Amino acid sequence: MSRPPSKMIYPEQSSNKDGQRNKEGLGELPAAFAPLDLPPPEEYFQRKVALISGITGQDGSYLTEFLLEKGYTVHGIIRRSSSFNTGRLHHLYEDQHERPNKFHLHYGDLTDSTALVFLMARILPTEVYNLGAQSHVKVSFSLAEYTADVDAIGTLRLLDAIRTCGLTKHCRFYQASTSELYGLVQEVPQSETTPFYPRSPYGVAKLYAYWITINYREAYGMYAVNGILFNHESPRRGRTFVTRKISRAVAEIYENKQACLWLGNLDAQRDWGHARDYIEGMWLLLQGQGLNLDAGEQPTDFVLATGETHPVREFVEKAFGVVGIKLTWSGSGVDEEARDVKTGKVVVKVDPQYFRPAEVDLLLGNPAKAERMLGWKRQVKFDELVKEMVEADLTAVRNFVEDQN
Ligand code: NAP
Ligand code: GDD
């Protein structure tokens, strides 16, 4: 018995709007592969729903607080891990009774397209913040392929999940771009027009992510933007980044729990700000501040920076200064060391294992465009940042708090 012919329309049978086949016989490229039945964007945008990749990281936790305060429903993607990776979000769980149903976590991964499409279709976000990344520059030399998969192709996967669900006009996309793109800097200070010269597998992966974000904006008319953020720190910074490594060690040394702090390149200079200030900038970038979208103005990319740069050595001096320890330096290169002036003990030494195969020597951002168009300016000054970090670590060390960061 033969079956009745199916009604399936195969791609080679599809046609364009006028019923004409194109040259390849494949019809027009669909705007979405699985379009959802969505209301028009004006109605859809009445909701405020954010989806954050990298929600468990330093920036993700501050951004979650910020958006919940603004009344958003916040959805975050967390990776499966055998140990807890939600330490920076614990205080928000405790607040659940005060913010019912506004904060949701979902398993997912930037290496898993299917999960991203599924989450996008389930959550129907109005804003997507792509903060997820293998974000450690030195580690990227050891895990170059993985870093490219997560940081570069992961960004593509997230953008394609938006397209797949037909959300290109329904949600705005923030890409966590970085001053590491400038690498071997081509001008000082660095602005939105400074040419890029990345110096690590991390920087190169982020270069792809930067351009694919722009490409999707231009190709599909998406509101997709890059925030080119210079280093931003806080007590929630991961402990293998230099500022937090220093602040924790100063607290441990002061409390006699550690003898010496071992570091790499003390001459590197960074434009360090406070993470909380930069979170507000990310959000402003998605609000179309300073843009006349109705008149057809396109969203653009922004640098967020303090406009100041400081060497690692200065961060060390200031951090020890917070607990009243004055340092004196001697030697040079791998033999450089710092002693506590009062006790004569060596408290800082150099270990070449922390050097990088290719270094970024100097970062100094020019935030003029963000100041002018977004009205954004960093609030926390360098000395205040160092003080806050050291004091937070002193409290943690005294209370035997071993955070997982
Ligand atoms: P972070 O503390 O290292 O957080 C990174 C986040 O990405 C974590 O939530 C991590 O999850 C998640 N993640 C890692 N691999 C993932 C994967 N395969 N799939 C999904 N999520 C994954 O970084 P951050 O300092 O908050 O920075 C946020 C973003 O801004 C990053 O993209 C970073 O590259 C970029 N950025 C940072 C700075 C800065 O100075 N902080 C400056 C410029 C740009 P786990 O918690 O499970 O590890
Ligand atoms: N991590 C680390 N550990 N860095 C050290 C050490 C050390 O023991 N000693 C010296 N440094 C130097 C590094 O060589 C680098 O020049 C500088 O301190 C800062 O290093 P990190 O704190 O690891 O940050 P980063 O600048 O490489 O990268 C961070 O900022 C980028 C934005 O510019 C990360 O957050 C990246 O994800 C981010 O894109």
Image (cartoon, grey):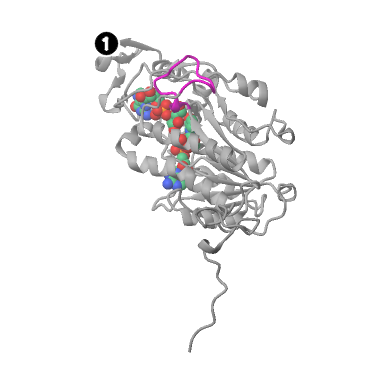
Q: Principal SS element in the magenta part?
A: loop
Where residue 50 sits: x, y (%)?
Answer: 62, 46
Give the quarter the ligand 2 occupies: top left
Residue wearing tag 1: 331
The structure residue drawn at horizontal position 38% and vertical position 53%, both measured from the top left corner, is 82
> Can residue 251 be seen from the camera position used here?
no
Quick check: 92 above or below 367?
below
Front residue of 359 and 184: 184
Q: Amino acid at mark 1?
A: Gly
Residue 107 percent location from the top left of the image: 49, 55
Q: Secondary structure at mark 1?
A: loop
Indicate if the residue with disc 1 has its beta carbon within 8 Å of ligand 2: no
- Left or right relative to 249: residue 48: right
Snapshot quadrant of residue 397: top left
| Closer to the camera in the image, 261 or 114 | 114
Where's residue 333, x and y in %?
27, 15
Look at the image and say whether residue 161 sits in the magenta stretch: no
The picture places residue 120, in percent across and down from the top left corner, at 57, 53
Please give the range of residues in magenta: 179-195
Say which of 327 and 343 sits in front: 327
State the quadrant of the C terminus. Answer: top left
